[in-house]
Amino acid sequence: MHYRNQFTLLLFALFVWSNFTYAQEGIDLEIMYKIKNEGMRNSQIQELSFHLTDLMGPRLSGSTNLRRSREWTAEKFKEWGLENVKIDSYGEFGRGWDVKKSYIAMKDPYYASIIGHPKAWTDGTNGLISSEVMLVDIQKESDIDQYKGKLSGKVIIVPTTLSTSPAFEAEARRLTEEDLEARKAVTIGGQGGGRYSPQQMERMRLQRELDAKVNDFLLEEGIALRLTGTRGNFGTVFHTRAGSFSKDKKKTIPEMEIALEHFGRIERLIKNGQKVTIDAEIEVEWLDDDYKGYNVLAEIPGTDKTLKPELVMLGAHLDSWHAGTGANDNAAGVVVMMEAIRILKSIGVQPRRTIRIALWGEEEQGLFGSRGYVQKYVADRQTKDKKGEWDKISAYYNVDNGSGKIRGIYLEGNDQLIPVFEKWFEPFHEMGAKTITRRNTGSTDHVAFDAVGVPGFQFIQDPIDYGRGYHTNMDLYERMQQGDMTQAAIIVAAMVYNTAQRDQKLPRKSWD
Amino acid sequence: MHYRNQFTLLLFALFVWSNFTYAQEGIDLEIMYKIKNEGMRNSQIQELSFHLTDLMGPRLSGSTNLRRSREWTAEKFKEWGLENVKIDSYGEFGRGWDVKKSYIAMKDPYYASIIGHPKAWTDGTNGLISSEVMLVDIQKESDIDQYKGKLSGKVIIVPTTLSTSPAFEAEARRLTEEDLEARKAVTIGGQGGGRYSPQQMERMRLQRELDAKVNDFLLEEGIALRLTGTRGNFGTVFHTRAGSFSKDKKKTIPEMEIALEHFGRIERLIKNGQKVTIDAEIEVEWLDDDYKGYNVLAEIPGTDKTLKPELVMLGAHLDSWHAGTGANDNAAGVVVMMEAIRILKSIGVQPRRTIRIALWGEEEQGLFGSRGYVQKYVADRQTKDKKGEWDKISAYYNVDNGSGKIRGIYLEGNDQLIPVFEKWFEPFHEMGAKTITRRNTGSTDHVAFDAVGVPGFQFIQDPIDYGRGYHTNMDLYERMQQGDMTQAAIIVAAMVYNTAQRDQKLPRKSWD
């Protein structure tokens, strides 16, 4: 009863207030029409997608290709007539790293190609190595002893707990009405308990300790190469990094991530007493000329005398993992955001507030670019010191959930925005976008803004090949659904425009 | 009316006869129990699967690994106490071919690994080649002129018409009741018209003529390597062969099949005016010491004085394509058939007729092994000359539709068998197998028997990862569903046993 009474009151308050707010959200239907028209008739999605994936290639943080991509996108912004285009350093990132050669194959018991890639920031092998593969199975510290003095110059594997299963689920799907409704539901008290029990946490801590000791041991022994199986099957390799990109990084073990099926074959052969030999070569190049990290920024300046120092931002991360071309993750987001601002510029909007696009660096390594930007210009997340842009940014919009259509928006718990976005999404119901949820969604650059109390949003998107796409060798141009991206760019352009024109900045959650 | 009267008569005749036949199909429930028990308790599926895929490797027709596999399976049959084990030549096949090295990567505009494999029976590259990629776009014969003298030593691609689409369909599924019912339906007059119109046939003929001319031109020019994109996406490469395995084969162009996404990238880059360079190496070894093809045969001899010269056969093809390990296609079938005969031997059946297993060679290149066997021992398909085994083989059972569960059987139009198999499948309804369809299914070794009027059957199986598995680099151990294969081996053992014990041979379709 207690809760029910409170809930009734809340509903009533929400009703009164939402009707008030709802009334004030104007939509300029002429501009909405022009945005749709420009996005559909003169789409640059295909050209941008090609350039960012096929031509720029994988854009690992700090790599040569990420540098090329910064230059290319900045040039594109200038070509489109955007202003204040700059490649802006947010501070230090670390070492750049390029793969110059990668080869791996099984030689015994028979020749077989292996799908594999060096882990990011791994050291090279100093030429072609040819070695028997040793299975190193260390369950407890004392197991290390039996391998002492035996591993120098060898290729090793550690048994995997990963397994494959038949693909009964499709990789791509459209969210149904039911899915979308479910996404609105909010569970009071959070969405379930913590993922791990204290006992599990302790086991994981001990495992990490043991892993670190094993790693030190393997380094000491001077193994030639470690092979790791990755989650994913059908030859899709998910990527992680080996060691550190820090400029003070010490030497690490050369490591390759290989297709789980190819890893499984080696493991099963050795466990059945068969000799397996591997030929492999990794050649890498370290870039030590510039440790800084960068974002690419560009603007359509505001025109309202009072409001023009204020900002509406849109962005996506330009960096990716290193074996695909970072297509769904996140050339798709970059292309959508670039296209959105191109559309606005092309139709000649004169926004009241300034519209600023940001292409972030180093998201995949921990949101470095967006957090660095926020730290430099917006606020300090720890000390809560506000900087110049804190009370100027009305909202930040992000796309980083692949190339699927926009179906709605996550409000990060900010209920006040429900009536605003309900109104703003009205012209896009016909395009399948209408779901406003107060839920949070995580793990990408809008979080950097949300963390300092500035409204930061990520859209709800159809999950198209994202599970096989993100962080994999198969995240390539073909994964990008260009029709879907055309829709997304139009909707982003509209949201950005509406935010730029609104009398007030968007209401915020409390932060101080 | 004419048809209706005939149909009524037919129905009546069928009713009388089927009740007669039905009554005589005895099932020995004790043996059925023992088969299930042995198959479930002492299954060798896992060990056999490992040996045939991981350990034997790809088993391309004529290759070293196929030779090893023949030896290993024959040894296994002897170990199990089967009799008349032999590696039996059916005649000439052609040259063996092994891959000794395969490497391909893009060097410009940036380094990127490429998933690719030499086409079967391609020639090698004579060491590492490094070349710009030329796009050769020949739509009509006169287009050839513009490339004359320009392609020597170059890597070339020909534009592809293949494309990828998002994976909205799952790779694996269980057949539903509805699917199974649909599979029983028979369309009088065939299942739809011919696939191609005369106009299409003519266009295809002209295209083939042009392709042959282009091929001759490329060979003359002395190109270093041709890259082909294949159907399939997410890095799955489907295989075909280049040129011929004939012992009289002339020199061919070295060819590699690469992942469609990687092919697409090269094609798009070149079309956009970018220079693409490739490093590649193919090293192959030709086996010219034995051009014969072989099947592996073994038996549980019959014990009935009158019936023991008669045969029940079961089989599957031992050969595969060359970049995976031929797991679903068709180590799965071989393992199921080996396990079925092992079960029968283990429980000590004393069959009336002789049970003979055959592991066929060279199925993938045109049913060479089974057709060769039939030609040698059963009958001549063309002349209709019958040989010794023609009236001795009661039935041939085949498994070659992947590792999915058996759900029923195709009767190849032989309606007389409906009541027989309805009865025989009764003990397996609980395992999901019950659908008897008079429909045909094609493209594997039972066709060789059916073609000479000897009952040859393939089972209805759940399609588990078969679409991504067959003829691909991803047809590996992990694709095999060992629980499903356990079920399949039990059912095959039961069908074979029932066929061996039946008073009469199975009724046949007319052939003479």
Image (cartoon, coloured by chain):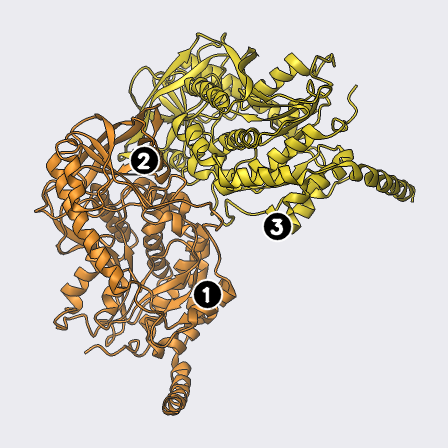
Chain colours: A yellow, B orange
Q: Which residue is mark 3?
A: A176
Other-residue count near label 3 (Cα within 10 Å), few / some / many at <14 / 14–19 / ≥20: few
The chain letter for the residue carrying disc 1 is: B
Q: Which is nearer the eye, B301 or A227?
A: A227
Q: Are marks 1 and 3 in contact (CB under 8 Å)?
A: no
- Give x and y (percent) for residue A388: 70, 13
The chain letter for the residue carrying disc 2 is: B
Of the residues shown, which amino acid type is indicated by label 1?
Answer: Ala
Q: Is residue A18 above or below residue B405?
A: above
Q: Is residue B412 above or below residue B490?
A: below
Q: Which residue is mark 2?
A: B267
Q: Which mark is residue B433?
A: 1
How many badges with numbers are in the image? 3
Give the Cα separation between the discs numbered 2 and 1. 47 Å
Residue at figure coordinates x 46%, y 45% from the top left: B166
Other-residue count near label 2 (Cα within 10 Å), few / some / many at <14 / 14–19 / ≥20: many
Of the residues shown, which amino acid type is indicated by label 3?
Answer: Thr
The chain letter for the residue carrying disc 3 is: A
SS for dot 1:
loop
The mark closer to the camera, 1 or 3, is: 3
Instruction: Work out whether residue B57 can be spotted.
Output: no
Labels 3 and 2 share a subunit? no
SS for dot 3:
loop
Instruction: Work out whether residue A142 can be spotted.
Output: yes
Of the residues shown, which amino acid type is indicated by label 2?
Answer: Glu
